[in-house]
Amino acid sequence: MGRVNNISLAPNAKNTLFPLFEAVMNSIHAIEERFGKDNILQGRIRINLVRNERNDCLGFIVEDNGVGFNKGNLESFIKMDSQKKAVIGGKGVGRLLWLKVMESVHIRSGFKDDENINKVEFDFCINDPIQNIKYHNSGRDSDIGTTVLLSPYRDVYARSIPRKSTTIASRVLAHFISYFVNISQPKIEIIDGDQSIDLFDQFTSSTERDKDFSYTIPDMFGDEKFVCHCYLLPKAISDDEKSTNALYLGANGRAVKRYEMDAVLGMKAINGKFAFLGYVESEVLNKSANETRTDFSLSDDEIDEIVNLAKINVKEFLKPEIDEIREKQEVVVANLRVEHPRFLSVARDPKKFSQQLHLSMQKEEDIFVELSRRSLRQYKKLKNGFLKSVQKKLPDITSKAQEYVAGLQSESVSSLAEYVMKRKLIIDVFEQSLKYINQDEGKSEYENVVHDIVCPLKSTSDNLEYEDHNLWIIDDRLAFFSYFNSDKEMKSQVHNAKDPLLRPDISVFDLGLGFQNTDLSQPITIIEFKRPKRDDYSLEKNPITQVRKYVENMRNSGAATKFDGEVLRQIDNTTPFVCHIIADVTPTLRSVMKDLGPFHQKVGSGTWYRWDNSYNIFIEISSFKDVLDSAKLRNKAFFEKIGLM
């Protein structure tokens, strides 16, 4: 009773089949004993599923035509820790698993004793291994064999038995995989009502390809040979209900430990329809399996070495499928280098870099994270190498310094390339926004969308980073200005605003290196957007008059402030203003420009400008197309240099 209770067997889909595996293994041994290992083709094993009226599986009936419970086998069965099967890996306690999941097991057996064929039946129980034993003295050759009734399971275990017979068949197939590579095997069938599954026929016909690999581990096991049998099979033959790939370490023809291979291979279903199953066997494993054949007495390091070398063989076997993954990874790396040029220095050769990636790393986001990790490690390695040489005054300090500087230069070039790449993408987005037509109104996109691309609405320098705005689209100098407001009311920008609710689209202040700028001659920039193709301007309502009002309010206030009232800089009548008006020069705007001008057109462009002496401001009116063309032209040399044009 104590030994049964001490057996660790959690009720799950995997463990509930171990008692079945024990019965099938006993049947195989009985067949080998009756017919000899060279003639086991004569053996028959039938696994009948026992179901209730709800079609739940309650257990199994295992039938074989093996040697049966003759006197020697019965004595061995009664004796715990029997050594009868020690030579073939039997520990003499496997049948205790039956009593872990059932109250008792009924056994019927026919056997040949001298020249007579006799029968015996009994109940295998915890208190008495041969309870209710009965003998029958007459029988026929066809009666030789054993029937084991592994039913009903205790409820807690029965609930975990896989419902599908195909799943059970696949798991039996995987558990006894070493027998399937033999030229001759006993016939094993799964019977579920009127459905029959021949395991060996299924295995033979469905194997896509197979190959054996041999290896040794001299440092640990001398000349002992390990054999890794590799199979590419339909995914339904995987021993996992999710049809994943697996590698087994086996002992004496039985799978003992299972290792997930999905992460190693980077794929669940190979080509969408196959699974990999591998089986490693060796005398080392045969001798070190524990009594219930669920683990080995080897150290973790020894097991890891056996498995790691087997993984190398697995990858060689699956090279065609792995090569396909590598090609996909290479494409992702190459694309990420284009989209994020800062990775140019860490992944100079996309193919070489992809070969270093884990096979499970196939998503773009995962590869991006790995590129970032490698980039950081590369930088730290160079930096630490240099610092170590400095601290220890090593003779290679000069070469380490040169290596460090070269790494920084490479990193800087990659970062600059990414900055240029981002500019190219922003320009592309800006260009596409100008093409948008509102289907309901038949008008181009409203100015706030274009505004949001250049600088997010309702924001200031306090809540945006340098990289968050694209003021350089208007003027490259604006990319380096220190403070700006976007779509903020005048009352939050200056003291005592005359028109507090006025809302300039963007106002930009250059504060230099300090927080406040006392140089009144430094210009303030105002940017105003108007809807593309708008053509309803008048002398009373137009962007020129609008920016003049902005300037007038700021000058009269005497100081620019943050939203909390803190002074940014002083403003007086001599403070110059630069006003960029982004609007298409339609007929009505052209008429206003004539009345409020004169405005002069830049040669070869659609941009107009004027120095307005009465307001001491420089006004520039550019169409959206001219802003786009100017941004393209200013960045063209950079785009060409990194191959973007």
Image: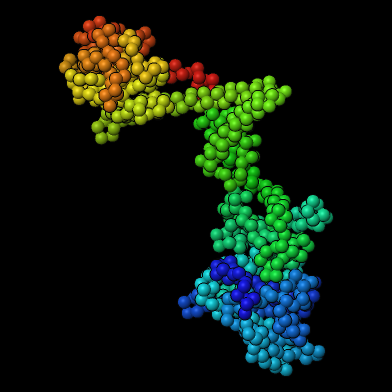
Query: Does residue 525 appear to the left or right of 259 in the view shown?
Result: left
Query: Does residue 569 appear to the left or right of 396 in the view shown?
Result: left
Task: Give the percent coordinates (x, y) of residue 155.
Answer: 51, 76
Query: Does residue 112 appear to the left or right of 369 in the view shown?
Result: right
Name the residue located 60 percent from the left edge and 53 percent from the top edge.
262
Name the residue located 41 percent from the left edge and 17 percent from the top edge.
513
Task: Give the percent coordinates (x, y) of residue 362.
Answer: 56, 44
Residue 525 to residue 372: above or below: above
Q: Residue furthest right?
A: 223
Query: Does residue 480 appear to the left or right of 334 in the view shown?
Result: left
Residue 191 to residue 485: above or below: below
Residue 433 visible in the current orientation: no
Q: Quadrant of the N terminus?
A: bottom right
Name the residue located 53 percent from the left edge and 70 percent from the top edge.
160
Name the residue located 75 percent from the left edge and 90 percent from the top edge.
117
Q: Nearer the viewer, residue 103 or 455?
A: 103
Task: Give the percent coordinates (x, y) of residue 58.
Answer: 54, 77
